[in-house]
Image: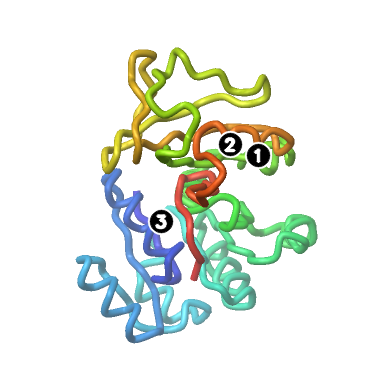
């Protein structure tokens, strides 16, 4: 499939990489020189220009694209780009940055196929929206739940335990486990917990402090909140 991604910022570039890794053809539109250079160093085809202009979209191949992802931080650019792309028969995905506006845009931006809020969905959510699939973040399903990554410290009460010996509160469960500096995987019951190991846990907010006490101990801040595609950090 062919995709046009508007923005080579964090969300746009990560989405483009995910699509390319799955074998899709991706063209990026970006007007910031530094971001254009960064995307080109990663071997992307980049059109230098304003994605809300029809001539720029046409140069990027909107006429032959299956979908357009307007993923900039500018709502006006995103909305205009989606209207132009819809005119060319593309599936359209529009990024918004304020959660409270999501209902408004879903109600009034009827021509847009999917409205996404990447602070919740991240690149994987944007990719699925472009492909026409569906994805829901934990925060959309149950606001009292949180996915966190915790790193075992030498102060952790469970240091030296195996996964099978780990007894978390009833409202918490281990989703993934990774040895120090190793990729996260589905946990094995025989794995031992050692300093530097990481656990990804789904837990109710009410038991997060208890979970942290067990896996980290009192004196550390080794806790990371994880979003729907397991990425953290600011979005551009």
Which residue has dot 3 on it? 15
Residue 185: image location, x then y, percent: 34, 29
- Disc 3 is placed on an element classified as helix
Which residue has dot 2 on it? 213
Q: CA distance from mark 1 to mark 3?
A: 33 Å
- Disc 2 is placed on an element classified as helix
The disc, 1 or 3, on the residue closer to the chain's N-terminal end is 3
Q: CA distance from mark 2 to mark 1?
A: 6 Å
How would you rate the neighbour count of disc 1 (Cα within 10 Å): few for under 14, some for 14-19, many for 20 or more? some
> Colour mode?
rainbow
Q: Which of pointers 1 and 3 indicates the residue nearer the eye?
A: 1
Residue 142 shown left or right of residue 48 in the figure: right
Which residue has dot 1 on it? 209
How would you rate the neighbour count of disc 2 (Cα within 10 Å): few for under 14, some for 14-19, many for 20 or more? some
Q: Which residue is pictured at 40% across the width and 56% down the height?
A: 15
- Number of disc labels: 3
């Amino acid at each position: 499939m062919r995709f046009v991604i508007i923005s080579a910022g964090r969300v746009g570039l990560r989405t483009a990489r995910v699509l390319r890794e799955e074998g899709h053809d991706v063209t990026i539109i970006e007007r910031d020189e530094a971001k254009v250079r960064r995307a080109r160093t990663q071997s992307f085809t980049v059109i230098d220009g304003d994605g809300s202009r029809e001539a720029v979209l046409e140069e990027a191949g909107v006429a032959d694209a299956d979908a357009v992802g307007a993923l900039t931080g500018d709502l006006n650019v995103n909305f205009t780009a989606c209207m132009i792309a819809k005119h060319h028969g593309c599936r359209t995905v529009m990024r918004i940055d304020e959660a409270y506006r999501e209902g408004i845009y879903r109600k009034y931006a009827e021509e847009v196929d999917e409205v996404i809020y990447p602070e919740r969905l991240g690149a994987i959510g944007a990719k699925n929206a472009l492909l026409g699939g569906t994805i829901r973040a934990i925060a959309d399903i149950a606001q009292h739940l949180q996915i966190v990554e915790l790193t075992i410290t030498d102060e952790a009460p469970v240091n030296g335990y195996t996964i099978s010996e780990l007894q978390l509160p009833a409202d918490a469960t281990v989703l993934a486990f990774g040895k120090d500096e190793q990729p996260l995987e589905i946990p094995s019951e025989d794995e031992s917990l050692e300093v530097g190991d990481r656990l990804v846990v789904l837990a109710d907010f009410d038991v997060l402090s208890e979970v942290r006490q067990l896996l980290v101990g009192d004196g550390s801040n080794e806790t990371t909140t994880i979003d729907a595609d397991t990425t953290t950090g600011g979005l551009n």
